[in-house]
Amino acid sequence: MQTAAGVVLAGGRSTRMGKPKAWLEWHGSTLLYRATAVLARTVGGPVVVVAAPGQELPPLPSGVTVVEDPVEGLGPMQGLAVGLAAVADRAETAFVCSTDLPFLHPAFVRCVLRGLASGPDVVLPVARGFRQPLAAGYRTALAGLVADLLAEGDLRPGMLFKHCEVAQLSDEQLLADTALARHDPMLESVVNVNTPEDYAAARDRPPPEIVVECFGALAKKGGHRPRGVRTATLGAAAASVGLTLDRHVVAALNGDQITRDELLPLVAGDVVSFLSADAGG
């Protein structure tokens, strides 16, 4: 993933939702924060948000940048062109997605990006019965081609696919990835929320099941034993074991990423280890 970037398109008008989807809350963080932070913890390159001109966005994770789409109303192809161009000098490939994917799992992102290693220009999941151009992998060098197609009036992603090499991934091919099959067997990574009803259904879903464990001075009365909890953010995981992410406590995500970001999104299969920051834990 070292040369892969993340691009999140946030400039849509959210007409069917009736309110900006980027600001919608899902178990402790906004949809936009969750999407960008999932990509930031997965890809090795930059993560950018493509926003409409003058669009107000909710707070974003540290290190995530915003690029403004200079032309409003041209749809996802315009956002794709702007996003790919913004990261092309720092990454060869990018996972591009919409804001509204509350169930996006890092295993899905990794599976799609690995498909680019064999040489195609686009890796296009065809999941749950539909093509998923806004949960797909793209070579960043496509930015110029997308811009040219837009100049000719071709606003649909399908037109891009006619001009480059596309590798499609069926449900079966996606689920051949053992990590993805284990953590997202229904391929809910591509489930988006377009209407208030979609959002209500997503909001009613329980947060993912993760494992929490405590070490050192924090492991009191058997607290070192791993326990399963349902929570969608690091702050909520800390609260589940009576902790606060202050200067005395630090978390290790899956044994490597060290963080105190209370809004860090958690996904199914995560293991969060809390350590005392005093005396090296």
Image (spheres, rainbow, N blue to C red):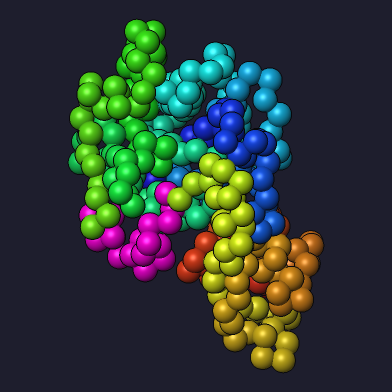
- Relative to 111, is 3 above or below? above
State whether residue 144 appears in this view: no
State whether residue 215 appears in this view: yes
Secondary structure mostly seen in magenta is: helix
- Relative to 15, is 187 above or below? below
Q: Quadrant of the C terminus?
A: bottom right
Left/right placement of residue 36 relative to residue 77 reads: right
User: Residue drawn 57% across and 63% down?
Assistant: 205
User: Residue drawn 55% across and 66% down?
Assistant: 208
Left/right placement of residue 25 relative to residue 206 reads: right
- Quarter-of-image position of residue 260: bottom right
In magenta segment, residue 176: yes
Left/right placement of residue 158 relative to residue 236 reads: left
- Relative to 106, is 81 above or below? above
User: Residue drawn 68% across and 20% down?
Assistant: 54
Q: Quadrant of the N terminus?
A: top left
Give 117 or 177, whichever is nearer the viewer.
Answer: 177
* Residue 211 locus on image (x, y percent): 55, 75
Give 228 or 64, whichever is nearer the viewer.
Answer: 228
- Quarter-of-image position of residue 249: bottom right
Looking at this view, name the residue that lies furthest to the bottom: 221
In magenta segment, residue 280: no
- Magenta part of the chain: 173-190
Give 191 or 275, whichever is nearer the viewer.
Answer: 191
Looking at this view, name the residue that lies furthest to the top: 152
Give 201 or 35, whichever is nearer the viewer.
Answer: 201
- Relative to 131, is 238 above or below? below
* Residue 119 locus on image (x, y percent): 21, 36
Count the marks: 0
User: Residue drawn 55% across and 50% down?
Assistant: 198
* Residue 45 locus on image (x, y percent): 47, 39
